[in-house]
Image: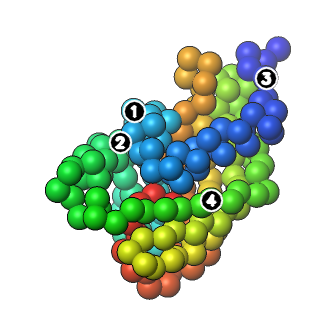
Amino acid sequence: MSQYQRPGLKKIEEFLYHETGLLDRMQLREWIDLFTQTGDYWMPVTPDQEDPVNHISIFYDDRDLMEIRLRHFDNPRSHSKDFTIRSSHVLGNVQIREFDESNGDCHVSCNFQCVMYYRDQQQLYAGTCDYHLVLLDGRYHIQRKRVDLINCDAPHGSIQTYV
């Protein structure tokens, strides 16, 4: 008999909607708190990139780097305070790819589109997200969020915040 039951798709979708909603509202403290202490956020620079450590990435932040970015964003003298960042995420095709009955861990994927507006410029980002979710104290947390942009290997300007 398995120790953990596979979560319903609705529960996973609600978690992902909550996570991207925090990004849309720029509630970065609460967003970072969704990650485990060893969790990371990774945006590869090539579609087939397998390793974030030995290859360059668009983003590769562990919890410490997330905290540094948050302190920079929250600093009253930061240039990021001069202009607001607005974004809107749309998620689709959410799938539970793998489920570990022994510990409740899930590998989840979804497609996304994110429109970001900053300093009179609007950017569209689209692609897939892969999540490794771990169950801690009865709630899911993010061990890794991998964001694969469909144009990851194209030139990009400065991406102002997490997508």
Badge 2 is on which residue?
A: 63
Under mark 4, the amino acid is His
- Residue 5 has which mark? 3
Horizontal side, residue 41 vs residue 136: left or right: left
Q: Which residue is mark 1?
A: 37
Among the 4 quarters of the image, the one containing residue 5: top right
Q: Secondary structure at mark 4?
A: strand
| Marks 1 and 3, how far apart at CA | 24 Å
Mark found first going from the N terminus, 1 or 4 = 1
Query: How dense is the environment of label 2, judged by Cα within 10 Å: few (below 14), some, or many (20 and up)?
Result: some
Residue flagged by tag 2: what amino acid is it? Answer: Arg
Q: Are marks 1 and 2 in contact (CB under 8 Å)?
A: yes
Q: Is residue 48 visible?
A: no
Looking at the rendered structure, the kind of residue marked 1 is: Gln
Q: Dot 4 corresponds to which residue?
A: 89
Sequence-wise first label, 2 or 3? 3
Instruction: Tell me the amino acid under the disc marked 3.
Output: Gln
What residue appears at the point 60 percent right and 37 percent down from the top-left corner?
A: 133
Decide if residue 82 is in sight here.
yes
Q: Position of residue 19 (x, y in %)?
A: 57, 44
Q: Earlier in the sequence, mark 1 or mark 2?
A: 1
Disc 4 crowd rating (10 Å Cα; few below 14, some 14-19, many 20+) is: some
Q: Quadrant of the N terminus?
A: top right
